[in-house]
Image (spheres, rainbow, N blue to C red):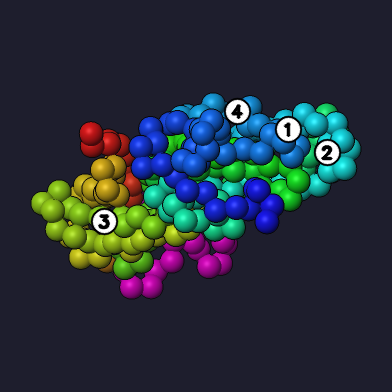
């Protein structure tokens, strides 16, 4: 079996941010195959805190390997550290990006996907060129994406969306702690919550995901079962006159973010 696809056993004493090691190896070398392709991750350095959009780069140093593989695609794969024992990173991890091997031997990949928050092993996967096994701390942003500031929502269709840590639960509660909605963050890092049982008038909703939370202030105007926010004739947004007629909307005023420690 190619050494890049072998099963990695992680030492129980591996330190936070340390390079993952194979306990049986007397030299405790990093999990990276420098004999086959002479490659290593250049950035970000091990122990870094990363997030979606992070750029990872590696260089192939062996001339013969580079000549045989230039232009081929390398996959960037992540696997939460808690799942690594007994697993192959390349075989069981989640692909979060890919990129070609450049003529100069460099590989640069921007992570378009993500995994859950916490310690994560990142690996460049390819039959002949690969490297990594470094541990990073994944820290996905937890925030609201819609509605935007002062953008209205019908109360009976009060759907709010955001981003967070894949697999985590998001809970929405009013200031008095009453639950008004919940959701589980998808593997793509997005979530959607439909708010319910909201009284008319201003209110503050607290969104919580584990130790992370943020507040969003809304104004609940009134209920409307079917009035659209867009004029079906002109296609334009309904203005203040529509609100005066009692159109039910949920208006986002501002957001405050915090993280528990």
Read off the residue under disc 1. 38
Name the image quarter holding residue 153. Answer: bottom left
**Disc number lying in front (2 or 3):** 2
Task: Point out which mark residue 43 bears.
Answer: 4
Residue sitting at x 29%, y 61% = 182
| Residue 137 in the figure: left or right of residue 7 | left
**Disc number lying in front (4 or 1):** 1
Which of pointers 4 and 2 lies earlier in the amino acid sequence?
Answer: 4
For mark 1, does the 10 Å Cα neighbourhood hold few (<14), some (14 to 19), or many (20 or more) residues? some
Most prominent secondary structure in the magenta stretch?
loop
Name the image quarter holding residue 198. Answer: bottom left
Q: Is residue 140 visible?
A: no
Q: Is residue 121 visible?
A: yes
In contact (CB < 8 Å): disc 1 and disc 3: no
User: How far is the residue under mark 4 from the one under mark 2?
Assistant: 21 Å
Residues in magenta? 224-242
Residue sitting at x 83%, y 29% = 104
In contact (CB < 8 Å): disc 2 and disc 3: no
User: How far is the residue under mark 3 from the one under mark 4?
Assistant: 35 Å
Task: Point out which mark residue 256 bears.
Answer: none
Secondary-structure class at tag 3: strand
């Amino acid at each position: 079996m190619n050494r890049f696809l072998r099963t990695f056993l992680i030492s129980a004493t591996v330190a936070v941010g340390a390079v993952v090691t194979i306990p049986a190896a007397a030299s405790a070398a990093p999990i990276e195959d420098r004999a086959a392709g002479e490659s290593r991750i250049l950035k970000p350095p091990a122990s870094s805190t990363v997030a979606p959009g992070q750029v990872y780069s590696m260089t192939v140093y062996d001339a013969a390997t580079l000549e045989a593989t230039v232009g081929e695609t390398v996959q960037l794969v992540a696997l939460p550290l808690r799942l690594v024992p007994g697993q192959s990173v390349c075989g069981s991890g989640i692909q979060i990006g890919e990129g070609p091997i450049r003529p100069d031997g460099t590989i640069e990949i921007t992570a378009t996907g993500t995994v859950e928050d916490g310690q994560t092993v990142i690996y460049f996967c390819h039959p002949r060129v690969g490297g990594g096994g470094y541990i990073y701390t994944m820290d996905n942003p937890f925030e609201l994406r819609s509605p935007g500031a002062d953008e209205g929502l019908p109360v009976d269709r009060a759907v709010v969306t955001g981003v967070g840590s894949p697999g985590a639960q998001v809970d929405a509660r009013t200031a008095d702690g009453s639950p008004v909605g919940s959701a589980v963050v998808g593997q793509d890092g997005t979530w959607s919550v439909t708010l319910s049982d909201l009284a008319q008038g201003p209110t503050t909703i607290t969104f919580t995901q584990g130790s992370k939370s943020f507040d969003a202030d809304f104004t609940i105007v009134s209920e409307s079962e079917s009035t659209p926010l867009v004029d079906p004739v002109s296609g334009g947004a309904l203005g203040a006159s529509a609100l005066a007629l009692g159109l039910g909307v949920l208006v986002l005023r501002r957001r405050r973010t915090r993280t528990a420690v």
